[in-house]
Image (tube, helix red, strand yellow):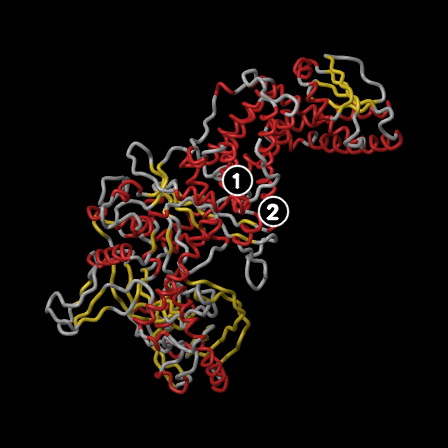
Amino acid sequence: MPDIAKVYDAKKYEDSIYQMWDKLGLFSPEIDPSKKPFTIAMPPPNATGTLHLGHATMLALEDLMVRYKRMAGFETLWLPGTDHAAIATQNKVEGILAKEHKTRHDLGRERFLEKVKEYVASSQDTIKNQVKKMGSSCDWSREAYTFSDKLSFAVNTVFKRMYEDGLVYRGNRIVNWCCRCHSTLADDEVSYKDENGKLYWIKYGPFELATTRPETKLGDTAVAVHPDDFRYKNLIGKKFNILGVLGEFEITVVADELVDREFGSGAVKVTPSHSFMDFEIAQRHNLPFKQIINEEGKMMDNCGKYAGMTTLECRKAIVEDMKNMGILLKVEDYSHKISICYRCGTVIEPLTSEQWFINVNKKLSRESWQKKDNDLLKDLEGTSFSLKDIANHVVRSGQVKIIPDRFNNTYFHWMENLRDWCISRQIWWGHRVPVYYCHDCHHIMVELEPMSVCNKCSSVNLKQDEDTLDTWFSSALWTFSTLGWPEQTQDLKYFHPTQVMETGYDILFFWVARMIIMSTYAVGEIPFETVYLHGLVRDKEGRKMSKSLGNGIDPLDMIDKFGADAVRLSLLIGTTPGNDMRLYEEKISGYRNFVNKLWNAFRLVMMICENNAGDSANLNLADKWIMTETQSLVEEVTTMLDEYRFSDAGSRIYDFTWSVFCDWYLEISKIHPNPAVLKYVLDIILKLAHPFSPFVTEAVYQEIQGADPNSNILMIQSWPKPQNDLIFAEEAKQMETVVEVIKEIRSLRVQVKVEAVRKIQAYIYGAEMTTALMKKSEVIKRLANLSELIIAQSGQKIEKSISKFVGNIEIYLPLESLVDSAKERLRLKKEIERLNAYITALQLKLNNNDFTAKAPAHVVELEQQKLLTARMELNKIEEQLKEV
């Protein structure tokens, strides 16, 4: 046998194995109509980002799926790519410029964009190489980038079609404005944090109002009350002059169901330009709008002496002035949530602004939706449907399945409350809105390619819209734009819809819902059949990882220290869809031990096979047992993977490899070797474990293959199937009993504190299992460390011994000269006390009529069986006590 290292060296194998897979083109599928495709579009990490635990979790899960499906015979495409990450990337480059005491405006738009492109180009390979470090078997020949020419053309095409269908419009609406990023944010790009603030009670004409933002009083145009609030019924529709810090102003009292009667006095001031709720109320009641806060977060010129102040400075000044005027009634402590920018953490300022929106409620005809001969509209009644209607329908009808399904309700709740999507951003890096304005004839054009001449009056005096599109707009096209859409490419026809979208539950709305909206609209089909959501990765105590806590884990550091397989296993086993997971270095180290266990099992198999020819055709009891166990393993793991129970599948492989194959069959093989069976079972383990730990399994497989590994690569081997002719149920049951007997002898040795190295004598009365036990007597002797083993069908009880029953089998270990009699008597008395207490508790339970009447019959029967077993055990211990 060649010299095989005693410890698996991940650094020796991982890079070379990955390069071999890539060089041989094993990640690239063919278009084969005779085979089913399996496609995952990788959620694109930021082009300028670095690998974090969220990425590592995503990569481990998706690579597991694609490796399994590839081995199962599917044409498997895992399409990788990166996102231009508009705001995040621009913020990074602006940060670099700030160190040089410059702003993007100092450079101008064109020079700034060149800087960003240079920055992206210099760092784009970093994330790609880090993705490879995880063992990701994605098709790099189809790698995509959201800001590539091909995908940019797809973005412009969708925008133009939506504009022509009346779904994209420019309007003056209230938006989430980040004063730091100087851009709008979509509703789901807004984060929230708790704040201990103040609630200010103000004298407001005939009302007493409570507000957290007294500075917005300068923009009030009404007071709103609930229509069913009897306290204010006689005031609805009336106008009042209100004393304010800048003099008197007039307000109207309106009734609206949006008002919460339980907040404050039940009457609220209405500031239409700076509150989403107030904007809706103002639209319904035709109230005037008055903007008082600008895009810098400062008070505007119409705010008199407060002009130029920040909102917080203005709040402080107004509170002081109201106090002096006697219209500030009281101030209370108040805890509430405030909205902040998800990127930079700046407090969001709601502002009215002219922006581009997608109308999610506009109805399109049934014919316009039916772009393909498929089931998209199946069982959907009606003649016209909105984007929201279709996005709801495909999930309700089961065309798109969300795992875990508890997130269905979350999805529907978000959809039902979805407002028109603001898609324009006031930044420079991103897809520029493809709209052109002619200054001469005022014609507005939406075009796919850059324009220089007006297509109406031929003027060259054109200007393109300054805004860029929301990053999520381009990302929403990811599943189909990456496959060549709007061209009807062979890739698009074969690989779309994709089968799985695996991502974090935190972007179900950011991204998943929008992909459903865009794919059903643009392509006329769902983007994916299944959405698999993973949770957040937390530390050992369940805390969110953060720089401030110093509890973050860098997956690249862990790969360097423990190997990619150990990192992958730690992210895959012990986690369930939609739930947060805990990760810590000891857990990763534990799975590194498993990787080494697998490697050492391979070494031992090779040594046994080299030193023993064996009679491979003649299967003994242990061979038939391990063969049967292996068929169960294949069937169970396959079912678990098909049901997306990845952790269960990983645990099953782990337990079988360590606790069945290594702990038992390999030990038995040292006594009764069968090389063919050893190699067969190891081969199955390698194939089943490959999607979880691809590097060590491929390394072992290559070592076994020898001289020409390229001709026989594990990654593309067929997935195992259970073989009925290798199931030996009766023999397997017998061998399980042998194993239980050995375990019980070991347990008895521990009870009486016999040293592990000391050989002892044992008697076994085997009843109907006598023949099977005698066949494996040498195995029992060796693994239970016995000097002498006497096996008979039945016999007299052995005096002065400790005993145990395994079913009808009696095991006796003579105690003479083995133990201290006094200590053993004390131990047995304590065990008798424990059993008596346990029996009493069971009797009380079974004597309770409530329990026996209400509990299911099988539960009562189980408790009765426990009682019977405990009494038998007590009788046996009492007999042992008499003998000691």
Give whichever of 136, 873 is nearer the camera: 136
What is the crowding at mark 1: few (fewer than 14 residues within 10 Å), some, or many (at least 20)?
many
**Mark 1, residue position:** 696
Position of the C terminus, as image quadrant, is top right
Give whichever of 269, 696 is nearer the camera: 696
Mark 2 or mark 1: which comes first in sequence? 2
Residue in the picture at 55% in, 34% down = 652
**Mark 2, residue position:** 589
Residue in the picture at 36% in, 65% down = 118
Q: Which amino acid, by three-letter code, is at mark 2? A: Ser
User: Could one spot residue 570 in this view of the protein?
Assistant: no
User: Where residue 261 sits: x, y (%)?
Assistant: 44, 65
Q: Secondary structure at mark 1?
A: helix
User: Could one spot residue 154 in this view of the protein?
Assistant: yes
Give the Cα separation between the discs numbered 2 and 1.
Answer: 15 Å
Q: Is residue 607 left or right of residue 237?
A: right
Image disc number at residue 348: none
Q: Which amino acid, by three-letter code, is at mark 1? A: Val
- Quadrant of the rendered image containing residue 786: top right
User: Where residue 76 sits: x, y (%)?
Assistant: 37, 39
State how many labels appear.
2
Q: Residue furthest left?
A: 457
